[in-house]
Image: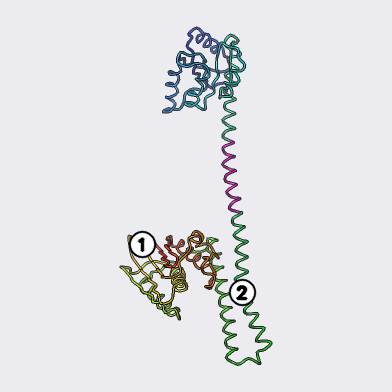
Amino acid sequence: MAASSEVKILLIEDNLAEARLLQEFIKQAESTEFSIVHVKRLREALNELRKGSVLPNPYNIILLDLTLPDSQGLASLAPLMNFAPSLPIVVLTNTNDDELALEAVRQGAQDYLVKRQVNPEVLIRSLRYAIERKQVLESLRAVNQNLEIRVEERTAELVKVQEINQFKTEFVSMLSHDIRNPLNTILLVAGLLQNSGDKLPQEKKLSHFQLMRSAIKNMAQLLDEVSFIGKADSGKLQCEYELIDLEAFCRQLVEEAQLSTGEKHLNIVFSCFGVGEALCDESLLRHILSNLLSNAIKYSLPNSTVLFELISQDKRVIFRIQDEGIGIPEEDRQRLFQPFHRATNVSRIPGTGLGLAIVKKCVEAHGGEISFHSEVGVGTTFTVTLPL
């Protein structure tokens, strides 16, 4: 405490003679300038402290008599501490009671003085030490709060690191599995052609070569998708906006998708409502819509309909793709956009589990949103909203 700083005391004492004596003792302080405000009741003290809720609290310490007309004993401590938790309190009593003194300190008082044992030196020392102890406690409390916050932050960081490490492990495991399958196909067919190629009819050879090409294509697609996810996660995925005729763009995608429906005999119905040209990244938009259309076809039931709606609404463009397929089980919906996650009811349908993760990254790169509604056995609707 600086020697030149003023210490303002709130004295709560109903006995005028004892109050004057304490004031005289305080005046004898040489190294510190004290000022004192005297009140007789707890209610008056609380009124003084209420001023500190509007203005900065002017007091540095409270001297509290434990026998007041409107409050007795340690019951006075709690209200004062509620109104001014940062102020140190020194209690005064006529009783030399160690238990009372310890209880006062336990409840938050910084010191305890027996009136008949008080002299100027004892009083001034008690006031100074009480203020210093309170400051130390407040500093420790602030340090503890900062430590708790830091521990929480560090714990969250460790949890995130653990989640990332777990994801990396799963990622490598799934990637190895998905690459191993086409590689095994290539090795098997290559070995068959090498050992028995001269004995196989031309038609069989062409069929085996087609298997190899398909396996290589699947592996290349998987590596492209993994590379795309890595680029997006590293923040390198940037939108290169250009003016696109969205209706014409979507109609072309529908025509391409219709050709891939094969023996399912699906009908893709496209509708456009008031949408013209818009600034989009054509490549990313193609990723979004091609993946969603491909999934709608892949998971649709034969002879069903896929609806594709393009809507302009409130400075937004909405793409909605609805199928009449197998639907998404409820337990899979929370993880639907995570890389390599595939729903539990699609084990017999080929796929990498990366398509929807890529879709979400592309939507986010546009500053848009993606949502879905699904019912098992009825179908799924994906809605992509992009700002215009």
Most extreme residue toward the left is 274
Please tell me whether residue 200 is drawn above or below residue 341 in the rendered image. below
Q: Amino acid at mark 1?
A: Arg
Q: Nearer the viewer, residue 154 or 201?
A: 201
Percent position of residue 295, x then y: 46, 71
Residue 196, x across and y down, in percent: 67, 89
Residue 160 screen position, x and y as percent: 58, 53
Q: Which residue is mark 2?
A: 181
The reply, left or right, for residue 265 in relation to residue 102 is left
Q: Position of residue 52 (x, y in %)?
A: 44, 26
Q: Which residue is at a point 36% across and 74% down the rendered structure image?
A: 269
Residue appearing at x 62%, y 16% in the figure: 98
Q: Are marks 2 and 1 in contact (CB under 8 Å)?
A: no
Badge 1: how crowded within 10 Å, few (<14), some, or many (20+)?
Answer: some
What is the spatial separation of the Cα atoms under label 2 and label 1, in whole angstroms? 42 Å
Q: Quadrant of the C terminus?
A: bottom left
Left or right of 137 on screen, residue 79: left
What residue lies at 58% left-to-right and 43% top-to-bottom? 150
- Residue 70 vs residue 287, the one in the foreground: 70
Which range is magenta?
143-161
Q: Amino acid at mark 2?
A: Asn
Q: Please determine whether, in this image, residue 277 is positioned above or below residue 29.
A: below
The residue closer to the viewer here, 325 or 141, is 325
Q: Earlier in the sequence, mark 2 or mark 1?
A: 2
Our reading of the magenta stretch's main secondary structure is: helix
Q: Which residue is mark 1?
A: 316
The quadrant the N terminus occupies is: top right
